[in-house]
Amino acid sequence: FPSHDNELSKYHKRIRGEWIDVYDILEVFECGCSASEHAVKKLLMSGKRGSKDRLQDLIEAGKSINRAIQIEKERQQPDDKRGPDVPE
């Protein structure tokens, strides 16, 4: 992993002597939904990334969670209820 502290991003944290980042956590827990992953990242780093404040990150995490719910509902629908396939 990073050999020097200056190679670390704002997403890295040292846990039990190991450097990990938000993306390591998402991979270990196998979220399987990009909208859920985005929400988790926003929640873990809310207000700490420098570009947005905590409230804005929480609002955006909520929007991502709502999108994840929508995706999951669509996944649970039988194939004949999903609508026509989009041609390539």
Image (cartoon, grey):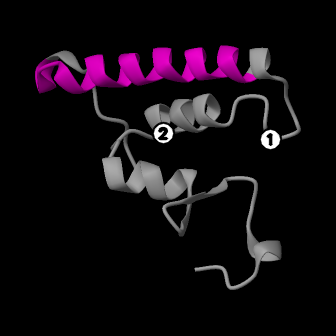
Q: Nearer the viewer, residue 72 or 15?
A: 15
Does the magenta-highlighted stretch encompass residue 68?
A: yes
Q: Position of residue 43 (x, y in %)?
A: 60, 28
- Graded by Cα atoms within 10 Å as few (under 14), some (14 to 19) or many (20 or more), the crowding at tag 2 reads many
- Graded by Cα atoms within 10 Å as few (under 14), some (14 to 19) or many (20 or more), the crowding at tag 1 reads some
Callout 1 amino acid: Arg
Residue hosting label 1: 49
Q: Nearer the viewer, residue 37 or 72?
A: 37
Q: Nearer the viewer, mark 1 or mark 2?
A: 1
Q: Secondary structure at mark 1?
A: loop
The quarter of the picture where the N terminus appears is: bottom right
**Picture quadrant of residue 50:** top right
Whether 16 is drawn above or below 64: the answer is below
Judge from the rendering whether residue 30 lies leftward or rightward of residue 76; answer left or right. Answer: right
Does the magenta-highlighted stretch encompass residue 21?
A: no
Q: Is mark 1 in CB contact (under 8 Å) with mark 2? A: no
Judge from the rendering whether residue 59 lies leftward or rightward of residue 83; answer left or right. Answer: right
Residue hosting label 2: 37
Q: Which residues are magenta?
A: 57-80
The Cα–Cα distance between marks 1 and 2, rounded to whole angstroms, is 16 Å
Question: Which label number is shown at residue 10?
Answer: none
Callout 2 amino acid: Glu
Q: Nearer the viewer, residue 73 or 18?
A: 18
Judge from the rendering whether residue 58 lies leftward or rightward of residue 15; answer left or right. Answer: right
Residue shown at the point (37%, 17%) measured from the top left? 69
Judge from the rendering whether residue 20 lies leftward or rightward of residue 29; answer left or right. Answer: right
Whether 41 is drawn above or below 61: the answer is below
| Camera sees residue 12 | yes
Q: Position of residue 6 (x, y in %)?
A: 83, 74
